[in-house]
Amino acid sequence: MLVAILVIFLVKKRKDSQLKKKQKEYEYLVTKSMRESLGQVKIAGFNGSEVSFDSATISPVSKVWGLNVVVFDYSFSAIDLDKEQVNHIREELKSKLEKFAREKDLMIDNGRCPLVVSDMWSREGKLNVEVAYLINEETLGYVHDLKRIDNNK
């Protein structure tokens, strides 16, 4: 009995370690896409090339939703935007992320972009951008659930 528990523990620990390693790889790719894409976004009152990633907080959503969810939250300080500006940035960023994915040959399923802005908001002088990398079912489910919540507001 004790041996079985130990084996189960070791298998789970190894699987979690592999998932964490994959998350780091995904975070690198998504952050690279965000740096390049957000830097190209320019709308009235916002210039993405002036946004500093050095002071940004990057948090994997997987800490809350589980290691298989490939979504990262980027929080940028000293950016105060209204709802209309946020919507314009979201649309521009969506376009730039798609361009990045095409250039890096990341497109999936009939030319769909795997990098999507799953959520974006500005509050209390911070711009938060969640970017999902649609690499697995868990991430697709997370994005689908967010859309359902937004539609019910």
Image: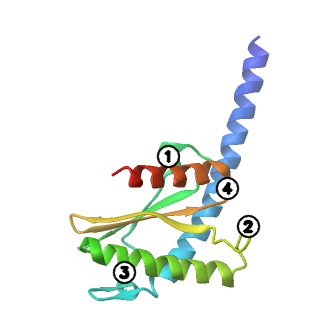
Q: In x, y percent, where is residue 39?
A: 45, 85
SS under mark 4: helix
**The quadrant where residue 74 appears:** bottom left
Task: Determine which residue is flagged by label 4.
Answer: 22
Using residue 57 as the reference point, say whether residue 114 is left or right of it: right
Name the amino acid, label 1.
Lys
Separation (CA) of disc 1 from disc 2: 28 Å
- Whether residues under marks 1 and 2 lie with C-beta atoms below 8 angstroms apart, the answer is no
Name the amino acid, label 3.
Val
> Which residue is more in the foreground, 65 or 107?
107
Q: How many marks on residues?
A: 4
Return the disc, 1 or 2, that comes first in the chain's sequence.
1
- Mark nearest the camera among 2 and 3 is 2
Label ID, residue 63: 1
Using residue 122 as the reference point, say whether residue 152 is left or right of it: right
Instruction: Tell me if mark 1 has few (under 14), some (14-19) or many (20+) residues whose alpha carbon lies within 10 angstroms of its own.
Output: few
Image quarter (top left, top right, bottom left or bottom right) of the N terminus: top right
Name the amino acid, label 4.
Lys
Label ID, residue 51: 3
> Which residue is more in the foreground, 135 or 87?
87
SS under mark 3: loop
Question: Which residue is rendered at x = 63% and y = 60% of the image?
Answer: 134
- Mark nearest the camera among 2 and 4 is 2
Return the disc, 2 or 3, that comes first in the chain's sequence.
3
Question: Which residue is rendered at x = 58% and y = 56% of the image?
Answer: 70
Question: Which residue is rendered at x = 67% and y = 81% of the image?
Answer: 102
SS under mark 2: loop
Q: In x, y percent, where is residue 26?
A: 62, 62
Name the amino acid, label 2.
Asp
Return the disc, 1 or 3, that comes first in the chain's sequence.
3
Question: Can you see residue 140?
Answer: yes
Return the disc, 1 or 4, that comes first in the chain's sequence.
4
